[in-house]
Amino acid sequence: MTELTDLTAAGAVEALNTGKCSSLELTSSLLKRTDDLEPSIKAYITRTPELALQQAKSSDEKRASLRKTNSPIPRLLGLPIAVKDVLTVSGIRCTCGSKILENYTPVYTATCVQKLQDAGVVILGKTNTDEFAMGSSTENSAYFTTRNPWDHERVPGGSSGGSAAAVAAHFAPAALGTDTGGSVRQPASFCGVTGIKPTYGRVSRYGLIAYGSSLDSAGVLARNVEDTALLFEIMAGYDIKDATSMELPVPTIQLDGKTDLRGLRIGVPREYFIKGIQPEVEKAVRTAIARFAEMGAEIKEVSLPHTEYALPVYYLIAPAEASANLARYDGVRFGLRVNTESNIEMFKKSRGAGFGSEVKRRIMLGTYALSAGYYDAYYGQAQKVRTLIKQDFDSVFTSVDMIAAPIAPTTAFKRGAHTEDPLAMYLEDVFTLPANLAGVPGLAFCCGFDNQGLPIGMQLMGAHYKEDALFKAGHAYQQVTDWHTRRPRG
């Protein structure tokens, strides 16, 4: 008999709709598992068990009432999920993994979360994150480092490491994350789960506390493609509260059991298989690409020639935007305040005490890149090269439907391995940054394991607003493989 905590999101919805379990039973089981294992995983910054049980009970009552009148039942009614702690939920503390917002409780809810709440989800809590989503390991959280459920000595990836770990550890069937430079896809790879980074503008950023405003995307982490598509379809769409959201229809995503991919053209970029990539990672990704070919897809080598510039371009543009976005945390309006006799000293000491070292590093990098005399040479030039990176993708998508590539050069590394070397940490995102700079969607999923039993992920990247094509291809792959069904011990 399947344990309730082993249910996928789609499986849980089916169980709720058929009466095999109640939301209260499902939520209680997930909370009990989290009680038992959370001390060793540390996926959550803020847990909300009382609220979750209350919402679950209300969901069951609402379902019973709607059934009596044969009224439509909200699509996700009673489904428990977790939310990354950079997305606001009214009345629940939102820290962004930072001491500067340790006691901040928002009075508004992020649009993507609100849409899911309107569809009936239950909120289990807010998951751990690198401070203001700046990091690739969750080690930059001001509170603690989340552990990878596959090996507690290793990181879960970042910055959505808490969400990925919660899904992998079966604390939640699905969780929300954000992706500014790979922060959904890389943790999905490290934790052996599935994640979607949508097209920029496809999902509203209202209520997503900004790191890099032209790069941030809210996405989903779950156990399989079907689950990520289920939540994505509800989250996506135009939002008048977000000027960057696109007023485009969201297609109904129809996933079936078909594995015939004849007619699909997949590009393999030569620039993504570089010197230094872990051999097992390259082998697993190439084996998966061969599997797509066996299903009928046409595989074609392509080139994204400006890929080598993505890392320096990102680390000029993202810190510059962070410098501007984080200027609001000054100890005056909200957040941490260190009281002094001088306002100037109060600003300095509040920001000094509230921000961690990585956030300070990126603020300084960004402020320098934007300063008089350097703007054109650094930030301005980076924006020009960003355009070239986007043009690379646009050009490739005239000849292929999607791109297949690794997500990270290695599997999950040990805690502390890169803490003294920021550049080594930044290099973990070398394969994910280009998609954010170009604004294209990316789907991450497991395609194997290394000889230490650690998950290996790959990504499919598509043209703008073509998430449905990625979901169909990824779902077909998961129909003929079982990597995504494997779980950590415990």
Image (cartoon, rainbow, N blue to C red):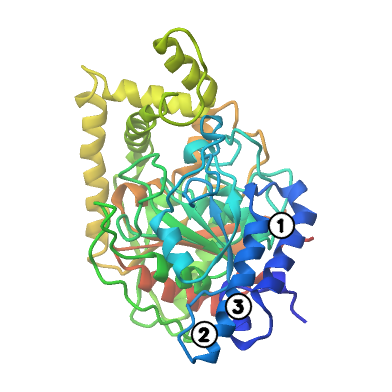
* Cβ atoms under marks 2 and 1 closer than 8 Å: no
Q: Split into 4 quadrants, where in the image is the N terminus?
A: bottom right
What residue is pinned by disc 1?
A: 453
Please state the horizontal and vertical placement of residue 189, each as a whole percent of the image. Answer: 56, 56
Q: Name the residue type under label 3.
A: Glu
**Is residue 226 placed above or below 108 in the rendered structure?**
below
Query: What is the CA distance from the residue labelled 2 to the residue labelled 3?
Result: 9 Å
**Is residue 363 placed above or below 439 in the rendered structure?**
above
Please state the horizontal and vertical placement of residue 293, each as a whole percent of the image. Answer: 44, 75
Q: Split into 4 quadrants, where in the image is the C terminus?
A: bottom right
N-terminal-most mark, 2 or 1: 2
Q: Name the residue type under label 1.
A: Gly
Q: Secondary structure at mark 2?
A: helix
Q: Residue at x 52, y 68 (%)?
A: 288
N-terminal-most mark, 2 or 3: 3
What residue is pinned by disc 2?
A: 66
* Label 3 packing within 10 angstroms: few (<14), some (14-19), many (20+): few
Q: Secondary structure at mark 3?
A: helix
What residue is pinned by disc 3?
A: 61
> Is residue 451 found left or right of 481 in the rendered image?
right
> Is residue 435 found left or right of 372 in the rendered image?
right
Query: What is the CA distance from the residue labelled 2 to the residue labelled 1?
Result: 46 Å
Q: Nearer the viewer, mark 2 or mark 1?
A: 2
Q: Which of the pair 366/7 is nearer the observer?
A: 7
